[in-house]
Amino acid sequence: MQYAVLIYSDERLWTEASAEDRAAYHAAHTAFDEAVRSRAKMLGGEALVGVAAATTLRPGPGGARLVTDGPFAETAEQLGGFYLVDAPDLDTMVDLCDLLPHQYVLEVRPVADMSSAEDWLDAQP
Amino acid sequence: MTTADVAEVWRDEWGRVLALLVAQYRRLDLAEDALADAFEAATRTWPSRGAPANPAAWLLTAARRRVVDRLRAEAVAVRRHPLLQVEAEVQQRAHAVLADPGGLVPDERLRLLLLCAHPALAPEAAAALSLRLVLGVSTEDIARLFLTTTSTMAARLTRAKRKLVVAGVPLTVPDESHLAERVGVVASVAYLAFTAGYAPGSGPDPVRVDLAAEGIRLTRVALALLPGRRLLSALLALMLLQHSRRDARVDAAGADASLVLLPDQDRSRWHHDEIAEALGLLAEVISTDEDDADAPTRELTLQAVIAAEHATAATASQTRWDRIAVAYAELEELTGSAVVRMNRAVAVAEHQGPVAGLALLDGLDERLPVSHRLPATRAALLTRAGRCDAAAAAYDLAIERCGNDVERRHLRSARQALNGP
């Protein structure tokens, strides 16, 4: 099954991290990457530039588009990156995620297969 | 065989047969419906035509036939991707067992239990699903236990099953490093089911207390499948001790029912066989080296120790409050819980007097801002300290916050007794 692992964290965790802390973060991501490659399949993943660089498009009045500066929601934790992994099951995926820094909030979401009728109905528009 | 006998087979065999069906067909919904149909057929035919020699094998065969019919009807005998991930080896063994249903193995049942009591489900959903799939409790009874309607509970169960399938939760037993954690989830799910039966509802309901016993049954099943787990033994001991008092807790059923508090309970109405079993379990748990017990096991053990002190006191006045106060102090250190602190205050008040107890209640108000138990406890201690005005104000607050008929009636009469003869 394909899973998206959405990484939420307080951006200050990274911007204010010491050189040692940053090395620890890197080491954790490397360990995750290696474990995924051996026990599952890494399909992709990226880190995102901070929300200061975010631009959000919302539905505006009369069907118009409203383009604004900033992220989708002003919360302490922001989406900071993601992985896309093909793992045998949720338990394996959760176990692998345990290797990522424990300061993160991680949301694991199955990826919908749009060729399946059931998934298609379940999937978000 | 009577209808009651069929019900007994249901209780004994439901979980085992369902576990095998799920392992083979990987379809929770189909397996559950098919087995319910098979039992329905059994209820119709066994009493008149006689029960088969091996009821479990009969049910398995009947349910299996129904699953196959449904799969044919759906014309999707093989799913594009398995909805529930099952190791090939487990599937093969389930096939083998189905071919020879005499040797039903416990392993499939453990997988089913761990599937239902999975951390990816909300605790109440996991508790409801475990009662339904592992024990075969009816949706109607589960709804009553959790104080909701049958249709709401049916929808909740469907959502829970769907989540397991869509999120890819596997039907496996994790390795030892993860199993301890999962046993913890099983324990909290079983305890949630148990305490739901005692949770204050809109009124008294003795049936809900009977349903609390399903939480005990779930723990027994878990302990049979995971022998030697001290967490489960401690939990079973605690539940048995609490449940042993059920008949003495309420006097008179129906609208006049009132809650009988521990000191006033008729101890001859306690279930002493259950107390004896609990003490045996507790002795086993304590005799093993305490230092390597994890925090949840220590917490449950301390709670059971406290319940055991109450259960073994011949009369209320002979209760060893000194020992109970010590156990509560340890429990508070372990959990930091405000509710534990409140209970500790009661024990200390019994041992050292109401003033010492009241001192321990200080500072709890902001930590328990909506609890009616805190003002009720304070009111009782203030009454004993002779401070009637303060006690009356505390009772008023408790009555205002209390949502349970039986408890509120009890608080009102205590408030009235203040005015005295």
Image: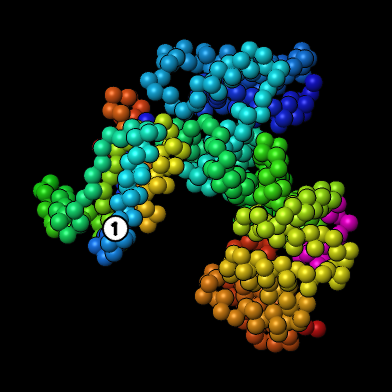
Residue type highlighted by circle 1: Arg
**Whole-percent x, y for residue A54 in the image:** 16, 54
**Whole-percent x, y for residue A63 in the image:** 12, 46
Residue where numbered disc 1 is placed: A22
Based on the picture, tell me whether residue B271 belongs to the magenta stretch: yes
Crowdedness near tag 1: few (<14), some (14–19) or many (≥20) residues, C-alpha within 10 Å:
some
**Residue B153 seen in render:** no
Q: Relative to B321, is B169 above or below?
A: above
Q: Quadrant of residue B345?
A: bottom right
Give the residue drawn at x 76%, y 82%.
B353
Give the left or right position of residue B55, taking residue B341 as reference: right
**Residue A30 seen in render:** yes
Q: Relative to B75, is B341 above or below?
A: below
Q: Relative to B176, is B58 above or below?
A: above
Q: Quadrant of residue A31?
A: top left
Give the position of the C terminus of chain B as an image quadrant.
Answer: bottom right
The span shown in magenta is: B260-272
Give the left or right position of residue B22, taking residue B229 as reference: left
User: Which chain is home to disc 1?
Assistant: A
Based on the picture, tell me whether residue B295 belongs to the magenta stretch: no
Residue placed most toward the observer, B272 or B93: B93
